[in-house]
Image (cartoon, rainbow, N blue to C red):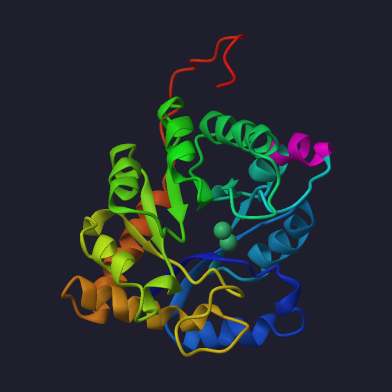
Amino acid sequence: MQVYDSHCHLADVRFAGVRRAVLARAAEAHVNALLAVAAEAADWPQLLRLRRRCPQVGVAFGLHPWFEHDPAALQRLPEWLQRGHARAVGECGLDFGAGRAARGEQEALLLPQLRLARELSLPVILHAHKSEDVLAMHLARLPGVRGVVHGFHGSQQQADRFLQLGFYLGLGAAITYPNAQRLRAVVASLPLERMVLESDAPDQPPFGRSRPNEPAFVLDTLSVLASLHGLNVEAMAEVTWQNAVSLFHRTYAKPPQQRSSTSPY
Ligand SMILES: [Zn+2]
Ligand SMILES: [Zn+2]
């Protein structure tokens, strides 16, 4: 069995000093590929070192909506993505939860990253919280942008919309909580070919696991996902592995440029 953790934050300070052990435990749990995503520019050098040292680790560079970023970071992002052999742009996105930055500010950070993903033919890793409809509206205006909505926890209608837009849905530990009946019903309805598995470690520990979460625990999520679809764990591991490979390990044909000077897209 081989398991692909499509979303973890290996540069997070909570893994300082224990990264090697965390990766060893992941390997023991058959987590043989990990996509380490960035939240801030400060994560980028750390992730690049990790990618060079650990062949099972791929990286994504981006600017997360929870944090304030130096405007120069956005300028440096294209070079990091290209020279760092990034598999995706991310994570980036929109979060309209309490205490987050104003919508306009978040959009001003997100839209250039979406355009960049399209220009570089890279998939994008999107964070969505209370923002799914707005995010889908932007994606509909940006044909050619591909990627995944990670940690998906929206409605059936929102899932259908992202699938229609050609997006994958990243499924994490939220589905392991017994009270997540609504989400589980949505996840059970998803087509097998559009689901990827993720830990989001060190955040979002599965039900019954203590913090910090780590990639090895993604097996708990895998097991719930398999049972929701009536598959055995090995089969679901293979499905989600192949999906992650299709999404992150292939280069897309460059879409035609559709930018006009007046459009924000
Ligand atoms: Zn996120
Ligand atoms: Zn994340």
| Image vertical order of residue 226 relative to residue 257, above or below | below
Quarter of the picture holding the N terminus: bottom left
- Determine if residue 249 is in view: no
To which quarter of the image does residue 94 belong?
top right
Taking the image as shown, residue 259 lies to the left or right of residue 232, namely right
Q: Which quadrant is home to the C terminus? A: top right
Give the magenta part as a residue range: 71-78
Q: Residue at coordinates 61% horizontally, 49% vertically from top-left? A: 85
Q: Please name whichever residue, 74 or 244, is drawn nearer the observer in this view of the structure.
A: 74
Q: Position of residue 230 (x, y in %)?
A: 16, 75
Q: Quadrant of residue 214?
A: bottom right
Q: Say if 19 sits above or below 255 in the image.
A: below
> Quarter-wise, where is residue 98 in the image?
bottom right
Rendered residue at 25%/75% (across/down)? 226
Residue 134 at x, y = what percent?
Answer: 48, 37
Q: Is residue 20 above or below residue 119?
A: below
Is residue 75 found inside the magenta-colored segment of the image?
Answer: yes
Nearer the observer, 236 or 172: 172
Residue farthest along the front direction in this orientation: 98
- Total marks in image: 0
Task: Determine whether, in the image, residue 111 is placed left or right of residue 179.
Answer: right
The residue that appears at 46% across and 81% down in the rendered structure is: 206
- Image position of 12 with respect to 162: above or below: below
Considering every residue shown, the one lying at the far top of the view is 261
Picture coordinates of residue 158 (x, y %)? Answer: 34, 46
Q: Is residue 248 magenta?
A: no
Q: Nearer the viewer, residue 219 or 134?
A: 134
User: Visible in this render: residue 187?
Assistant: yes
Task: State whether the magenta stretch is mostly helix, strand or loop.
Answer: helix
Give ligand 2's quarter of the image: bottom right
Residue 31 percent location from the top left of the image: 45, 77
